[in-house]
Image (cartoon, rainbow, N blue to C red):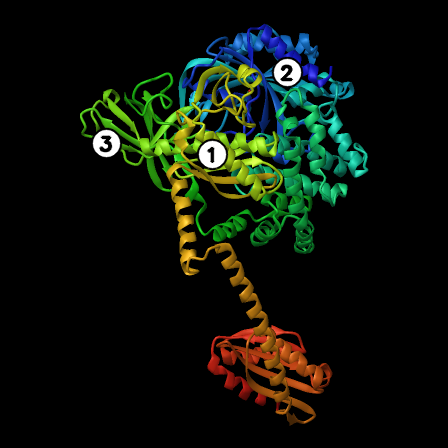
Amino acid sequence: MKAQEIRQKFLDFFQEKGHQIVPSAPLVVKNDPTLMFTNAGMNQFKDYFLGNKTAPSPRIADTQKCLRVSGKHNDLEDVGMDTYHHTMFEMLGNWSFGDYFKKEAIEWAWELLTEVYQLPKDRLYVTVFEGNAEDGLEPDQEAYNIWKNIVPEERIIFASKKDNFWEMGDTGPCGPCSEIHIDIRPAEELAKQAGRALVNQDNPLVIEIWNLVFIQFNRKADKSLETLPAKHVDTGMGFERLAMAVQGKYSNYDTDVFQPMIQLIAEKATKTYGKDRQVDIAIRVIADHIRAISFAIADGQAPSNNKAGYVIRRILRRALRYGYTYLGFEEPFLYGLVSTLATQFADVFPELKAQEDFVAQIILNEEEMFLRTLVNGLKRLEEVTQDMKPGENIDGEVVFRLYDTFGFPKDLTALIAKERSLGIDEEGFEAALQIQKGKGKDDAKKETGDWIILHEIDDTEYLAYDTLDINTSIARYRPVKIKDKTVYQLVLDRTPFYAESGGQVGDTGYLVSQDGTLKIPITDTKKENDLIVHFTPKDDFTKLEHLSEVEFTAIVDAKKRHLTENNHSATHLLHAALRQILGPHVSQKGSLVNEKLLRFDFSHSKALSPEELTQTEHIVNQKIRENIALDERRNVPFKKATEELNATGLFGEKYGEFVRVITFDENFSRELCGGTHVPSTGKIGLFKIISESSSAAGIRRIEAITAEEAENYIQSQLQILDELKEMFKQPKDLKKAVESLIQEKNALQKELEKLEGQQVQELKKELLTKIEQVGEINFINQKVALPSVEALRQLAFDLKNEQQNLVAVLAANIKGKPQVGVMISDNLIAEKNLHAGNIIKELAKEIQGGGGGQAFFATAGGKDLNGLDKVIEKAKGLLS
Ligand code: SER
């Protein structure tokens, strides 16, 4: 069975069992501060488990791109070393949201594995949760009893919380689980030892393939478990491992999921996979990492220097170093793998194919950047480690320098150290890093307390599109500590506040209690896991009696909202105009919309010309003048929006089954968008681009302003023009007036240089008459006035050319600043053991300055003009 068929059979199986098949969520997580990347299929459903939202269907199945490289689930260290861990992998999953539970989940898993995939029953083992006293949890006898009806009891193993209680992160939905393991060892191994003892023992051929989690709890910030209102199923099966088992291989990398890439890398490196352990590891690392990097970039996370971006950069650099050291890739090579990957996944994850060139370009850029320092970094590391003994740690300061100067992520240095049986001094590294950052690491930490529930609500009624004020009450709140400051998050029954998303900032405003006694300022509104949270700096409100029942009027700051809307609608017009002018490859890569400006990042490989910018601006302003009415459609089925209506969406955005479509002229701009907009484009008034720049490789950034901001900007520019005209005494043609001023200035400059040249010549003649004899040396030791450092240099060289056995000390006043030059004839350097650089160091002290140079010529600048006489004195002394 080919991998593609294995995947399809999973989805078909669960579709037949009443599951709705949904697309994979993007790899990069937005709106959840506890998570950077999707690390499990269930992430996108977190709110359904917690009861914050109702699932569109009680049964769902999919294949989900997951990345386990940070936080609670991190497999990075194992990747490539072994044959069954990955950074990015596909997780096949089926879910029940308060619908079926353990019995169906277990029976269907068994049916699929043994009947559809025909995996031999006598190779399968199952584990169940043994209970945990600390959490007050009993053994999962229920699961045990269900399994007992399916498999012989000697194939069921009770296991501990570590393996059989699944948690998404430090907090969040969780529950006991039951895992299915497979023993794929060859028959002779099997005869020696039964598989049971090898389960959960890190044997590469006795591995977990499917995890059935019975979600019943929410792990709270205080570590306690809260029972959820309903019971759910969350299963996850490693697709690549399943493929290995079904295809009868001993390594995930030997399946057709990885083989095309493995062979491509081997071919590029002119190596053969399967001959040499180190080479194989390197090939596996690269075959794995290229997937994580490419899909993360396609989902909107380019490599960068912080947070999620740095995780991707680290993975990329790890791959590069393996390629460089073990496969001999000295030039960028990763980018050349993207196209094979994109084609392989075109039907499951089409986002990569659609952005193939863009992704390759970003990777190439990263490769070029790191390869420039990699060689030197490795050399440095070699120097440092050559005399070290196994077990020693590389100094933290060195690890930091490698990071800071050569771009070596700490874990890369640790990896190379490990290959030499060395460690790294983590603490020393952290200390050096903190010194550089100039602040404690904990500053940026955010701690969230548990919610205090006042009353249960299903979902906040979201009225941001319909009104700017509404009566409401507080459903729950919690304290959040950000950088030692505590603020409060509020969830309301209904809200008119727009929650930050799609680049548009969150609304601000007030909640005013009905009796007018309390006014709660709302300083920001955000989405966290689809909860709409309002931020307020103080906890006065908690002192109100019967807080749960208190009615508030929620009032949005309308002025700020309207200005923001101008900029958001203008962003759509800009996007459409850019596609018209530059081409359809332009796609949004980021945006910020607030009351002051709009910032739009988009894929395009070179700077826009002034003409392109003018044209873009012109189209947008034309569309503003056409005063096109907003066409807002809610709850449009996703397929209809993208296929029939041809609306533009964003890569890396998670769209639900129903989307909102914003149109300004169906032939011009139609986007999937959750933002708020002007009722008609005329309200924007005016659109002005204020900058165009590069935001990252392959991405351009335009900043623009609208309405009053744009008017003020143009006014101020015109005012500068008026003032210029005034300075030029109101010329008929200002441009000509400026041009002739520049010409005049250039001519004068030339004239001046000529005069200065003559002056230097005169000076030279004069100095040659002032030579003193000190033994055989012709000594010139004079104070001079010169127009520039360049003139001093010229003078010194001219003197050297015309006079033999020369030592010249020129103490120059250059337009009020002291400068000293020392010139020595070449023959004297060896004969008399003289060095201009050494002499200048001494002389520089007299003018409170410093300098240096070569043996025959050196200069120094300083601060104290009065020191020039002392320079002459000292030079005399030095020479004699
Ligand atoms: N959440 C579980 C896991 O990731 C099952 O999907 O293993």
The answer to which of marks 1 and 2 sits earlier in the sequence is 2
Which numbered circle lies on residue 41? none
- The residue labelled by disc 2 is 125
Amino acid at pointer 2: Tyr
Position of 569 compared to 582: left or right? Answer: left
Which numbered circle lies on residue 519? 3
Q: Nearer the viewer, residue 605 or 706?
A: 706
The answer to which of marks 3 and 2 sits earlier in the sequence is 2
Give the quadrant of residue 812.
Answer: bottom right
Q: Is residue 791 above or below residue 457?
A: below
Kindly report which numbered mark, 1 or 2, lies closer to the viewer in this rendering. Answer: 1
Q: Is mark 3 within 8 Å of ligand 1?
A: no
- The residue labelled by disc 1 is 621
Give neighbour class at mark 3: few <14, some 14-19, many 20+ (Cα, 10 Å): some
Task: Measuring from the top left, give residue 431's x and y in whole percent.
Answer: 50, 51
Amino acid at pointer 1: Asn
Q: Marks 1 and 2, how far apart in space?
A: 67 Å
The picture quadrant for ligand 1 comes to: top right
Give the quadrant of residue 343.
Answer: top right
Are dots 3 and 1 in contact, CB under 8 Å? no
Position of 192 compared to 58: left or right? Answer: right
Task: Measuring from the top left, give residue 257's x and y in whole percent.
Answer: 71, 24
Q: Is residue 834 visible?
A: no
Q: Nearer the viewer, residue 576 or 867?
A: 576
Task: Measuring from the top left, give residue 215's x and y in whole percent.
Answer: 48, 17
- Residue at the extreme front of the image, as rendered: 732
Local SS, label 1:
helix
Are dots 1 and 2 in contact, CB under 8 Å? no
